[in-house]
Amino acid sequence: MVESKHFRMTDLPIDERPREKLIKWGPESLSNAELLAIILRTGSRNKTATGLAEELLGYINGLKGILDVSVEELLSIRGIGQVKAVQLVALGELTKRVHAAQYDKKTIQSANDLVEILMPRMRFLMKEVFLVVLLNSQNQILGIEEISKGSLNETIVHPREVFREAIRRSCSAIILAHNHPGGNPEPSLEDLKITRRLYKGGQLLGIQILDHLVLGDGRYVSLKERGII
C-alpha cells in the first residue's frame, strides 16, 4: 500500500517549480495557480501546491474571489488548514489596501470619479460589501474603510460604525458605497432606509454625506443624482 503524503514543490521537476520559474523568467510568466502555489508552499494529499491552488481558484470562482473569501470558507477545502487560510485572507486584504493606497489624496469631483476607483474592486464580489470613503475639505480621499460584509440591514450598517473612523480622522465629508452581487445596481427599499438614517446622523455630527453609490456589474446608481441625498 502506497502511503499518501503532502506534495511539496520539490516533488516537481525543477522547470515546473513555481519559485524557480519566477526567479528564472519573472512573475509574469506564472499562471494564477502557480503564483498562489508559492503562497500555499505545500499541497494536499495526492495534490501538488499548484494542483491545490487550481482547486482553490475553482472554489472561489477565479482569482477575484481572493478579495471576498473568509477563513471559514477556505477551511472547508481539503488540504487548506488554518495557516494557509489565514495567509490567503491576508493576501486578499493586502490587495484591497494596495488598491486603495493608489488613490490616496485623489480629488473626487463627481460620482463617476469614485466609480472608476471602486468598480474594479467591487463588481465581481459574491457578497454585499459596504464601504465608507473618507474625504477631507478638498474632497480628497483620506481612506476607504470596509464597514460590513453580507446582506445590508440597519443592525449591520450602524451609524456608530460608519462615522467612527470619519470622526477619528476629522473628515469633512464621506461617501457611502456598496455593491449588489446580482449585478443590478437599482437601490432596494432597505438601501434607501439606511441612507436616510445615516444622512441624518451625519447632519448631527457635522459630517456631510455627499453621495451613496450602489454598484452592479459595470453599472451604478448615485443616490445624489437620484435626488435622494
Image (cartoon, helix red, strand yellow):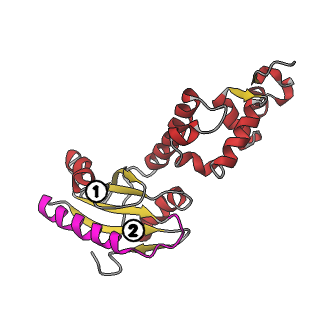
Which residue occupies 57% across, 39% down?
Answer: 74
Which numbered circle lies on residue 213?
A: 2
Residue name at image x 75 percent, y 39 percent: 30
Which one is closest to the eye, mark 1 or mark 2? 1
Main SS class of the magenta portion in the image: helix
Residue farthest to the left?
A: 204
The magenta segment is: 181-205
> Residue at (27%, 54%) from the top-left corner?
162
Q: Please state, as top left, top right, bottom left or bottom right, where the N terminus lies in the image.
A: top right
Q: Residue at x 55, y 27 (%)?
A: 83
**Other-residue count near label 1 (Cα within 10 Å), few / some / many at <14 / 14–19 / ≥20:** few
Question: x, y percentage for residue 97?
Answer: 46, 44
Helix, strand or loop at label 1? It is: loop
Residue 182 lies in the magenta-colored region: yes
- Give whichever of discs 1 and 2 has the lower sequence position: 1
Q: Front-most of 84 and 10?
A: 84
Q: Amino acid at mark 1?
A: Thr
Quarter of the image where one finds residue 128: bottom left
Q: Give the answer, above or below, for where 105 lies relative to 113.
A: above
Image position of 190 (left or right of 88): left
How busy is the neighbourhood of tag 2: few (under 14 within 10 Å), some, or many (20 plus)? many
Q: Position of residue 180 (x, y in %)?
A: 48, 66
Between the residue at mark 1 and the residue at mark 2, the CA separation in whole angstroms equals 20 Å
Magenta includes 128?
A: no
Please report contact status of discs 1 and 2: CB closer than 8 Å, yes or no. no
The residue pinned by badge 1 equals: 155
